[in-house]
Image: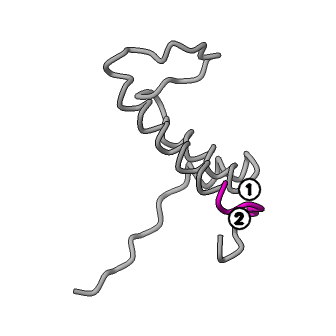
């Protein structure tokens, strides 16, 4: 956000929202194998544990940060950047 990449009008609420989305996605992914389903109507979308669940969660997070859906999908489905080298 400091670099101006994301259009955020309320940084605190954005932070709260992103944390909530990430924690909810983790909880859904962890509870899926135990419960078998989330008990919500799927509308054809894959459930946690199925195809590209993490990418779909990332798209939602990026949209909260101000990216449009098309750009968020492109970023979420792209390769991860190389890890920075940490000196010993």
Give, as a single range, the part of the protein colored magenta.
Answer: 6-13
Residue 10 magenta: yes
Asked if residue 67 lies left or right of residue 40, the reply is right
| Mark 1 Cα-neighbour bin, 10 Å: few <14, some 14–19, many ≥20 | some
Query: Left of 49 or right of it: where is 4?
Result: right
Residue 42 point in image, percent of width and height: 59, 16
- Secondary element under disc 1, as helix, strand or loop, is loop
Please determine whether, in this image, residue 49 is positioned above or below residue 18.
above
> Residue at the location (53% across, 43% down)?
55
Front-lying residue, 11 or 66: 11
Locate residue 8, reporting x and y percent.
74, 62
- Badge 2 marks a residue whose secondary structure is loop
Q: Residue 15: x and y, percent?
A: 60, 57
- Check if mark 1's residue and mark 2's residue have beta carbons within 8 Å: yes
Query: Disc 1 versus disc 2: distance between alpha carbons?
Result: 6 Å
Which disc, if any, is residue 19? Answer: none
Q: Residue at 74%, 56% (x, y): give it.
A: 66
- Left or right, residue 45 beside residue 29: right
Residue sitting at the far bottom: 87
Residue at coordinates 51% horizontally, 12% vertically from top-left? 39
Quarter residue 48 falls in:
top left
Q: Main secondary structure of the magenta part?
A: loop
Residue at the spot of label 1: 66
- Which is more toward the observer, 38 or 12? 12
Quadrant, the C terminus: bottom left
**Residue 11: within the magenta?**
yes
Vertical position of residue 81 compared to residue 68: above or below: below
Badge 2: few (under 14), some or many (20 or more) residues near its Cα, within 10 Å?
some
Is 88 rendered above or below residue 42?
A: below
> In the current view of this chain or complex, which residue is farthest to the left?
88
Read off the residue under disc 2. 6
């Amino acid at each position: 956000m400091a670099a101006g990449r994301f259009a955020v009008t309320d940084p605190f609420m954005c932070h709260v929202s992103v944390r909530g989305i990430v924690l909810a996605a983790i909880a859904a992914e962890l509870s899926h194998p135990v419960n078998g389903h989330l008990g919500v109507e799927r509308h054809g979308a894959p459930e946690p544990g199925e195809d590209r669940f993490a990418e779909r969660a990332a798209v939602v997070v990026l949209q909260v940060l101000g990216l449009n859906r098309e750009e968020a999908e492109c970023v979420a489905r792209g390769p991860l950047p190389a890890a920075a080298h940490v000196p010993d």
